[in-house]
Image (cartoon, rainbow, N blue to C red):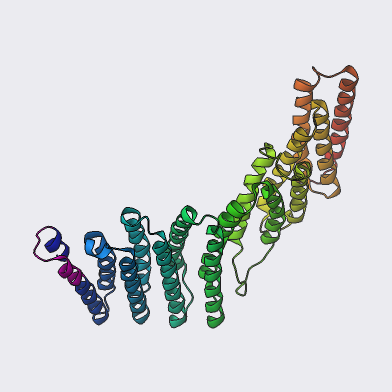
């Protein structure tokens, strides 16, 4: 009614409309507290944060807008704490970020310092609100509450990083790490005070930390030439995280870091398999050899773990593929590449026999098949007679010995 009276009918002036909107919001809050009505409080939140969209008087300059939003954020956070209405500060959190960002991009794009100050203030206010809410209620965050908060964290991160990347690109990753550290500190404080953090809050904080580490550290701070080495190290990290057993005393959840590490590993796997921009990587031939070696090592360590046994076939497949592609990238003679494939197949078969691992032994059949087809279809035509005889001899001996060893594998 206030907006219509001012914008469409001209019945009241700009200042009167502003005071009218504020009065309606405060009245709605009072009624919400009086009748214990969550809907009235949410109506007040919606009206307060959308007022600058309709009333130009509220968006005159950056300072006034920052003060306006900050005061309401503090007010609604205080109301949410007093009335124990988490939805009030959650809705305020989303509207503050979205509406301010909209107004900033449309009207105040040049005043980015004020926008950065605003984002930092909102992060501090609503982080404090969430922390105090948990302490006041003496209960950890539920799973549904965590799902309500996580998109807001993503939104804050995206908006702040975009702003910093435009104006302070060198500091953007470091500031992102600082905000992640502040979030972690608040989480640890609550955990210490309550004696527990709950699975939901633990997963929420861990997921945000994993996001910041991947985006700010791996994608922006790490030199691209070192990325394959990091992916190589993360194979061991994933192996360690997969064997980690969590309980109530575990500070952080492992699954966000596992998925983040797997994403990095898979990206580098593709890079290694296709030898994509590996020339700039220090000791790139060694990297090509270490990927299959560490993959085989991880497979052997994880194959007997009942909880993650379903992942080991994929790990074994990658180990074989990376070994075969490493031979392709490191050996210039096609026939010798086939010999290397036969060697990998023979080692896999022998390993399956010695370790009594039927899966490892059976996987060698595909390697023998691919090596044999490559030799017959591609290698024999363009090679010298002596090399051709040698390759066929190696193929025959490998297949004969492989068949004999295969019969000795343990039954399924």
Where is residue 236? Give x, y as percent. 72, 56
Query: What residue sits 33% from the left and 71% below the top?
Result: 67
State how many labels appear: 0
Image position of 393 (left or right of 159): right
User: Which quadrant of the rendered structure holds the N terminus?
Assistant: bottom left
In the rendered image of this protein, does residue 285 appear above or below residue 157? Answer: above
**Is residue 311 toward the left or the right of residue 332 in the image?**
left
Task: Give coordinates of residue 383: x percent, y percent.
Answer: 83, 19
Q: Choose between 407 and 336: the one closer to the eye.
A: 336
Magenta stretch encompasses residue 61: no
Q: Residue at x 43, y 82 (%)?
A: 136
Q: Quadrant of residue 57?
A: bottom left
Q: Is residue 18 magenta?
A: yes
Would you say residue 200 is visible in this rendering? yes
Magenta region: 8-21
Residue 259 appears in the rendering: no
Query: Looking at the image, which residue is at 31% across and 53% down?
Result: 106
In the rendered view, tell whether residue 183 sits above or below residue 170.
below
Q: Position of residue 330 (x, y in %)?
A: 78, 35
Q: Tell me residue 273's x, y (percent).
A: 69, 39
């Amino acid at each position: 009614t206030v907006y219509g009276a001012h914008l469409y009918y001209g019945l009241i002036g700009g200042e009167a409309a502003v005071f009218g909107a504020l009065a309606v919001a405060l009245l709605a809050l009072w009624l919400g507290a009086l009748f214990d009505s969550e809907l009235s409080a949410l109506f007040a939140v919606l009206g307060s944060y959308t007022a600058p969209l309709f009333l130009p008087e509220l968006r005159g300059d950056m300072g006034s807008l920052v003060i306006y939003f900050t005061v309401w954020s503090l007010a609604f956070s205080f109301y949410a704490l007093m009335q124990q209405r988490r939805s009030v500060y959650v809705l305020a959190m989303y509207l503050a970020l979205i509406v301010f960002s909209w107004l900033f991009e449309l009207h105040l794009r040049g005043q980015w310092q004020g926008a950065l100050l605003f984002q930092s203030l909102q992060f501090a206010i609503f982080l404090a609100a969430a922390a105090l809410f948990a302490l006041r209620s003496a209960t950890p965050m539920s799973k549904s509450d965590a799902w309500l908060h996580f998109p807001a964290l993503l939104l804050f991160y995206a908006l702040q990083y975009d702003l910093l990347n435009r104006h302070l690109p060198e500091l953007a990753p470091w500031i992102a790490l600082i905000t992640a550290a502040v979030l972690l500190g608040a989480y640890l404080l609550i955990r210490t005070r309550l004696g527990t953090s709950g699975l939901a809050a633990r997963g929420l904080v861990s997921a945000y930390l994993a996001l910041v580490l991947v985006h700010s550290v791996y994608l922006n701070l790490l030199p691209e030439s070192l990325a394959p080495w990091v992916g190589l190290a993360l194979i061991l990290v994933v192996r360690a995280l997969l064997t980690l057993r969590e309980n109530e005393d575990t500070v952080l959840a492992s699954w966000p870091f596992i998925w983040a590490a797997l994403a990095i590993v898979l990206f580098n796997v593709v890079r290694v398999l296709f030898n994509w921009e590996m020339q700039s990587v220090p000791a790139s031939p060694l990297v090509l050899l270490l990927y299959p070696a560490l993959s085989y090592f991880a497979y052997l360590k994880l194959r007997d773990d009942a909880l993650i046994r379903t992942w080991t076939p994929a790990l074994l497949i990658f180990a074989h593929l990376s070994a075969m592609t490493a031979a392709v990238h490191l050996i210039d003679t096609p026939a010798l590449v086939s010999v290397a494939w036969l060697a990998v197949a023979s080692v896999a078969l022998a390993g399956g026999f010695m370790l009594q691992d039927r899966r490892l032994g059976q996987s060698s059949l595909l390697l023998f098949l691919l090596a044999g087809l490559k030799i017959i279809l591609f290698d024999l035509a363009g090679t010298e007679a002596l090399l051709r005889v040698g390759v066929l001899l190696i193929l025959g001996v490998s297949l004969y010995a492989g068949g004999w060893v295969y019969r000795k594998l343990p039954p399924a």
